[in-house]
Amino acid sequence: MAQEQVKEVKIGPGRHGGRGMPRPRIKDPGRVLSRLFAFLFQSYALQMVVVALCIIVSVFANIQGTLFTRTLIDSYITPMMDASRSGAAVDYGPLARAIARVAGFYAIGVAAACVQAITMVYVSQGTLKRLRQMLFAHMERLPVRYFDTHAHGDIMSIYTNDIDTLRQMISQSVPQLLNSAITIVSVLVSMIFLNVPLTILTILMVVVMLLSSAAATKASGRNFIAQQKNLGAVNGYIEEMISGQKVVKVFCHEDENVERFDELNEALYQSAFKAQTFSGFLGPINAQLGNVSYVLCALAGGAIALTSDMTAGTAAAFFLVLVQLFGRLSVGSLASFLTFNKNFSMPINQVSMQFNSIIMALAGADRVFSLMDETPETDDGYVSLVNVDERDGELVESEKRTGRWGWKHYHKADDTTTYVPQEGDITFLGVDFGYTDEKMVLHDIRLHAKPGEKIALVGSTGAGKTTITNLINRFYDIQDGKIRYDNININKIKKADLRLSFGMVLQDTHLFTGTVRENIRYGKLDATDEEVVAAAKLANADGFIRRLPQGYDTELHGDGANLSQGQRQLLAIARAAIADPPALILDEATSSIDTRTEKIVQDGMDKLMKGRTTFVIAHRLSTIRNSDCILVMDQGRIIESGTHEELLAMKGRYYQLYTGNRPETEERKN
Amino acid sequence: MIRTLAKQIGEFKWIAIISPLFMIGEVIFEMIIPVLMGQIVDRGIYGRDLSFIGTTGLKMVIVALCGLCCGMLGAYTRAKASAGLGRNLRKAMFDNVQTFSFANIDRFSTSGLITRMTTDVTNIQNAFQMLLAMAVRAPGSMIVAMCMSFYLSARLAGIYLVAVIFLAIVLFIITKTTTKYFKQVFEKYDALNESVQENVTAIRVVKSYVREEHEISKFDRAAENICRMFISAEKRVVTIAPLMSATVYTCILLISWIGAHMIIGVGGGSTLTTGELMSLLTYCMNILMSLMMVSIIFVMLTMSEASARRIVEVIEEKSTIGNPADPVMEVADGSIVFDHVMFSYREGSGEPVLKDICLSIRPGESIGIIGGTGSAKSSLVNLISRLYDVTDGRVLVGGVDVRDYDMEVLRNQVAVVLQKNVLFSGTIYENLRWGDPDATDEECRRACRLACADEFIEKLPEQYDTRIEQGGSNVSGGQKQRLCIARALLKKPKILILDDSTSAVDTATDEKIRRAFAEEIPETTRLIIAQRVASVENCDRIIVMEDGQVCGFGTHSELLENNTIYREVYESQTGGDRDFDEKG
């Protein structure tokens, strides 16, 4: 059955990368990147232009500032020093003007940087918001099949992991990269201005640094994999034992647990210690390589200065540029160290780190986009469900809630609209269905539910009972055959209206974060408080709700974890009751309610079912005995049908199930 | 809070203390380099002295090597200390959780405990490593650079001092306000993700009520809200970088102006060289970058504060149930007495869950317990093996108050098969031996026979050596329940409690298990909680629970006669009215 394929959703430890995180692979990173940028530009074209302009301005201002050291020494200090030595009067005027001019450049640069940074905040957060909203809206419109065929944990990880890495990329890596780019470009341009051979030497040194850290990264990678593996083992053990902590207590198994845990914990410690040590080596290696670069540049620069006409100012300015460059690299490595720790990804190396985080973000973006590329549920229906009133024997559409429903059927052929009363007559004509085309799970289903009838489906797990209900409200579309609702092919009915016409209470009750009242009101958003209470009373939920600490205003969290399964089912019934739907589908709706309470609920349910076509799936006989028709299902086929008495008289499968005179049932795995 | 965490550093204390010393060494060596560079400019380049450049260069390489050694040793000690802290924290928590009573476990949610032991520990471990690496380094390099600047020129260094103080104040204000913002944002952010999860799991509900648009607009509002909060927080953070550069620029300009005056000097008396000016400009960068690091550390520490608090909560949690001073080490027999027992889950204020329960059960009796949802059936039996302590009154097992027993002795004699039961990953044998680590294969198989688990086990390819997946996900609900019963039987307890433990077992097997109990372990007191009357009607006596009270205690026929609730339950289930057992 579809619901059973769904895996447990797990968020929690896994989310922050407790498990090993292999380097992601994407088929076409370029395409993903360009799509991401297209998405960014779509709504922020102007802002992006502003950002680009600001970047250019700050680079320009930066270059001016850097080159100023040379000007300062060569054009002012040295001549003025000479002048001062020769006893002439020193005029500080030109220097003051030069400083004022540079101050102007700096001011423009800072202003530009400010504008750029703040604009980027708006752009990145706005983009993320839009991405989230689009993703969610798209997800809501996907067919149930998507949710049945994708592990919920995987879908969740798109929101938690992938959007998160995107968030980090857009709001951290990109600005950081921009910042580094600004520095590197301006440093490079300044260096070229100052001295070409030294620039080449510096670039060579940077390449050596990158290569050496790449090598060290690779060496520590092995240890990181071991660390991740051990971390996974420890986390897994914690998860398993803490989940079963009560059982551990009952069996006094604490000491054994501690022993085993110590082993795992020790292994994790050893590998973590090694991995961290190796990655910790990277920082000092890089820093000292930077220092060695100074020395080499100093030597080379000295040689050049001696043999050519390089001035002291140029040399000094060049050293300062170097400091700026390597200083930036080491701060960069610090910043990446931070993100690295957060992400658990590869060791410290600024460039490869940022590259890595971008690759990871792109992989995330790829998954985000692939969800957005999923085909949403299509709806070709045009017949809608409306409130109707009878006037002069004719059905007319009504604005008010009349308690009577009708199908508004527009006929294209002759441009007329007819109204058919909603009665709840449902027919299956030779329906075949399979979740995949290869494997059919329902074969030639024929059934006819007359208006107001209660139809029960019985049979063992996997017989296809839930599948039938999935078809009636078109969670899935059938492969062959026809389903007609009040003699209208359900494919012609708008999905929203079709579904609204059924109240569904499912075995796995799901509630939403919010108050009890809000949860009941989910069935009818504009319901008054009185209606909420009335629905709760009908479902016999009023009593326990009043006993909750804040009554109807009690907040529910985590799918109503603070309620018992039975109480949650009662709430789900109340939620269905308030919607006041013309027809009902009850899939094991009372399975977790004890028989006595169920009997009381049953009265409410009977009231609810009165006059409505109802499909009931239950394994409790009391729930189905008074059905108008009981369908016994086996392996996707209806093998018997009739009323309780008829089926008993038949002495077939139903009789066997009922009397318990049956061969030992084979075990089935849930 | 800090003290509790610091205690966990334990045997790594010395290494944690030494580690920053290496960092200081690295910083000092790094700070020597700008001085040497200034000398290269002054004497090497101005003086056109290549051999001086060579010797100074050599000095620089040596200094760099020393720095490298310090740096690597620092990295080594840091890794050892932080990984050690992580290990100790995990151990301290895990060990303490093992002493938790049920009430303690209820207080922390399972997923909460898991997060604390995994993610939170990792956060703290990283923060600690960061702290060791940067807490000394950043202020250290700032101080050393400052000292060097003062050494070169006190007048110019004064500018730095002012700039640093100014920036420090601004940074402090910005980080302080933004961390508060960020905390709020991340809380909201988690809530947003939770609502996504709800939508994913409850998609059928959303779709069947056609609430897609409703959910989308709800989500849109939340996303909009989060976006606004993020923007207002980040807007403040991103101004830090331009602010820093503005300060650097101001310093550079001021130093250039004043420095120029000093170099040229009044009347030829120069008080500064060009090379020194350059060294000063280098220190300027150093100082401000260190300041930036300090602010990052500050943010990181405030961020990990929440993790630290959560960890400390677990470490400091005291078990609500402990062994008595002079425990009774033997359980005489399987008799149970409830003597005016009152019980509530919350101490003091809580509504009593059990009200004035008085019961007396003889050794070897079989007792059925039946009652509606929430009638406190489970709470009643949980008191027997002292999973919770009574609020008032006493529970006697074998004539002794359960609070006087050694807990392990008591729990080994009172075996409970919990309603929410779990199997652990491992073979079936391994799982069974939770009940008795020394049980022979033969004993294990006998327990399975009693619990009617032998049939399906023997059909498995590897029989008793079949691996059970975590949480028992590869066996069906009924099979799991039977394995859990077998596991409890291996304890050879004097009292056996089955808390709705056969709900997923079909009626025929259920009956077979009960018959096996009656025949094979008649001397064991059995308490059976069940939904089905059929599961308890053959018991010696049946307790009917209603709303935390015992409203009937007698044999099946007695209760049918004089207990309305029991009769109602019975009637609602009989008339041949049984379940379609399909769960197997």
Image (cartoon, rainbow, N blue to C red):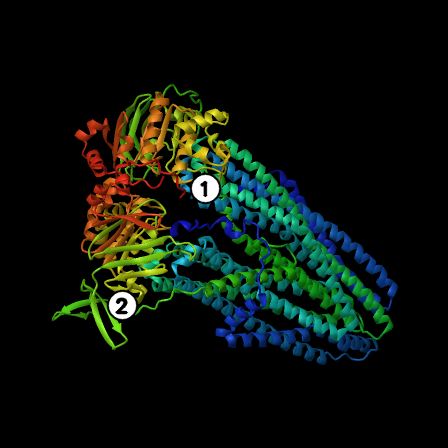
* Relative vertical location of residue A212 with respect to residue B556 in this rendering, above or below: below
Seen from the viewer's position, the closer of residues A295 and A3 is: A3
In the image, residue B200 lies at what x, y percent? 40, 56
In the image, residue B569 lies at what x, y percent? 22, 37
Does residue A331 appear anywhere in the picture? no
Q: Residues within 10 Å of mark 2 (few under 14, many from 20)?
A: some
Secondary structure beneath dot 2 equals strand
Name the kind of residue labelled 1 in the image. Asn
Q: Chain of mark 1?
A: B
Seen from the viewer's position, the closer of residues B264 and A102 is: A102
State the residue at coordinates (72%, 68%).
A321
Residue A478 lies in quadrant: bottom left
Q: Chain of mark 2?
A: A
Seen from the viewer's position, the closer of residues B341 and A646 is: A646
State the residue at coordinates (42%, 62%).
A139
Does residue A663 appear anywhere in the picture? yes
Query: Do the residues at pointers 2 and 1 share their chain?
Result: no
State the residue at coordinates (19%, 30%).
B560
* Relative vertical location of residue A646 with respect to residue A185 in this rendering, above or below: above
Q: Mark 2 near mark 1, Cβ–Cβ under 8 Å?
A: no
In the image, residue B129 lies at what x, y percent? 61, 49
Q: Label 2: which residue?
A: A384
Name the kind of residue labelled 2 in the image. Ser
In the displayed orientation, state which residue is furthest to the left: A392
* Relative vertical location of residue B484 with respect to residue A98 in this rendering, above or below: above
Q: Label 1: which residue?
A: B474
Compared across the picture, whether A311 is left or right of A450 comes to right
Estimate the spatial distance between the alpha carbons at disc 2 and disc 1, rounded to whole Å: 45 Å
Compared across the picture, whether A401 is left or right of B266 comes to left
In the image, residue B25 lies at what x, y percent? 72, 51
Secondary structure beneath dot 1 equals loop
